[in-house]
Image (tube, rainbow, N blue to C red):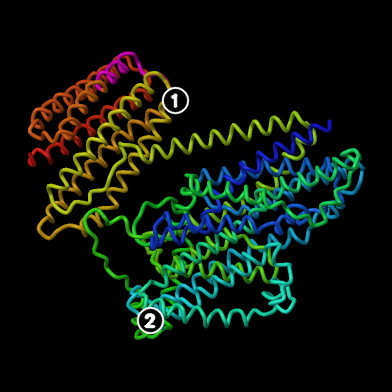
Amino acid sequence: MDNIYLLMIVALAILAIADLVVGVSNDAVNFLNSAIGSKVVSFKTIMIVASIGIALGAIFSSGMMEVARKGIFNPGMFMFSDIMVIFMAVMITDILLLDFFNTLGMPTSTTVSIVFELLGAAVAVALIKIGAENGNFSDVVNFINTEKATEIIFGILLSVVVAFSVGALVQYFSRLLLSFNFEKRANWVGALFGGIALTSIMYFILMKGIGGTSYASQSFDTLDGNTIKHYLENYVFTIIGINLLFWSFLAYITISYFKISIYKIIIVVGTFALALAFAGNDLVNFIGVPIAAWQSYEAWSVSGVPATEFSMTVLATKVATPTILLFIAGMVMVLTLWFSKKARYVTQTEINLSREGYGKERFEPNFTSRVLVRGSILFSKYFSLLIPNSIQEKIEKRFEKPVIELVKGKKHELPAFDSVRAAVNLMVAGVLISIATSYKLPLSTTYVTFMVAMGSSLADRAWGSESAVYRVAGVLNVIGGWFFTALMAFIASGVAAYLIFLGGATMIAILLLIAFILLVRNSLNHLKKSKEIKAEDSLNRAESKSINGVIEESADTISKVLKRVSKVNENAINGLVNQDLALLKKTKNTVGKLESEIEELQNNIFYFIKNLDESSLHASTFYINVVGKLQDIAQSVGFISKVSHKHVHNNHKNLKDNQAVELKDIAVKLNVLFGKVRVVFEERSFGKIESLLEEKRMLIKEVSNCAQKQVERTRATESSPKNTTLYFSILLETEDLLKATMDLLELYAFKK
């Protein structure tokens, strides 16, 4: 029986490595987004700076491991066997929960997840113990550190509101001070802003990065015998005042004499600071539980007391974590940062929600987002009546965005936001986390950094009338996910602890196998999704400035669309004839993606027209017509796919044999014809279009003949109204599909 606990320790060690990987994939969003979004330094530089911060933070994080040992539950109330059940349930749940959010690309809080998992598992085991002893279930409060749990819940609510509000206010006044032409402002203005920002970030490094380590409790003669932590907490204004003078002076020298952008320095230092604090304080979320389990096992194994009788009061004492373990954990985190594709995917979510200008919106608007946006617009209108017009005009000038001329093909490589907003994000996040740390308030770094970024985006007018409902919906989705994290972490961990308590080693093996299967499946699904995004048939926006360039680019797009349309139509007909619901469902999803991509081309028309040369404005009309015809083609094949899926999904009668034969024959001929059209566009042999138009007319005539045959069958023998309606619908949409393709060919017939 003793061996089972040793095996559990081994399993927890493996789970710790897996948790480090999924945890860093989620939390990389906290310290990478500002630097990546602003593009002031290369991606490689950002990664190197963040890696150094993570490595140093991990090595200095020993003092933070106490949270997993005694921060949530009272260890003296549990036996060693109980503690191992709790820790195993927590780690399995944590990996699955974080990986689930990573796969969705949604940032969540690793702090909140581990806390509520510990809380859920501890409550479950406490209830089991109380029930076995016929005790009062209200005694569960004796097992749980209720004060800490209440503080964390309060911290969640407070951090969301405060971070968003402060981020918006600081960004608004920063923009008033600096405007969007911040590089042209007087040197002293940039120096003052740089001094404030760097002071905030440096205090954050001292307070959160160093103040949270074990070294902060050591006293030094240079500090008059005080500890670092005591000095930081009691000489706040002295530290801030000296830093402000020093950094403001250094910023002025840097700007005036070395001609180096102070904003670039702020972003690099801020990225290092957040990475340092992340590793130094959040490492406990990933390896705190396994280390606590290992230390518990060491204490129990030499006691000679049965596992069910060995009280875990040992966890209430402070035990240092070996530096070698912290170093190994830091290296795993650094490697994950460099190689995790899921980390990039999660990072894209925040950048997408906070970016300037046009881009593909990831979230669909909902009722709440529409109401909030509409209410905000009305409030803004009424509020503007209170401000004199002269002041409003001055404010508007501060928010005027400069027009940036780019060379051909660089339109969509603009940064998501400028250096000022990136600096504000890092500065405000650092200040808020530092203040919370000094008052010993529990705070999620994910919540703070995300909500600051959203608040600064709103204040910076990045959320215009054309994007606000999408961005607000995205923020609401992310916030909803946070509360979902807490609830699911509590419930899932409690259930897992109960199952382990009932099933013992067998249940642990089953849960580990389930966790492994789910992780592998999610990784494969994510890999598949990534490949689909990079697929060779994905559609590209036209960015040429001349009619000939547009013809060349759009010809490639048409070839890709027709290849996919041909496959969708073939699968839809085959799925309908063979009653293959799985194929029809896949086909419906495929055509939905195609329609979405063509819609994105449609949304890009405004930017395409703005990018044209004066002598090539005729290209705009041509491109609009091309995209319009592609939309018609996609809608027709989409309708065929959807009605076929609906027919089979509702278990209606199969098509009659003659109907099936006719539809398959038309589908085969349509595939052949689309293949010839694709060759024309791939080879730019537009001279062959006339012969193809004649073939299409013949096929349209054949479709009409099939419709006439069905009319005669309906009058004579047909007995299924659903089949008849479906058959006519497919024929009519096939005819529309052919006509839209003919119109597209005629556009190019004059360009040969």
What residue sits right under mark 1 in the picture?
581
Q: Is residue 646 visible?
A: no
Residue 50: image location, x then y, percent: 51, 57
What residue is at 27 percent from the left and 23 percent from the top?
A: 667
Would residue 319 appear left or right of 16 to someone viewing this image? Answer: right
Can you tell which quarter of the image residue 265 is in?
A: bottom left
Identify the residue position indicated by label 2 in the image: 187
Give the residue type at disc 1: Leu
- For the image, the number of numbered tags is 2
Where residue 39 sits: x, y (%)? 38, 60
Q: Is residue 442 left or right of residue 609?
A: right
Looking at numbered disc 2 in the image, what kind of residue is underneath it? Asn
Where's residue 662, x and y in %?
A: 27, 18
Residue positioned 70% across, 78% down in the render: 234
Which quadrant of the rendered structure holds the C terminus?
A: top left
The secondary structure type at the circle numbered 2 is helix
Mark yes or no: residue 663 visible. yes
Real-space CA distance between mark 1 and mark 2, rounded to the nearest whole angstrom:
67 Å
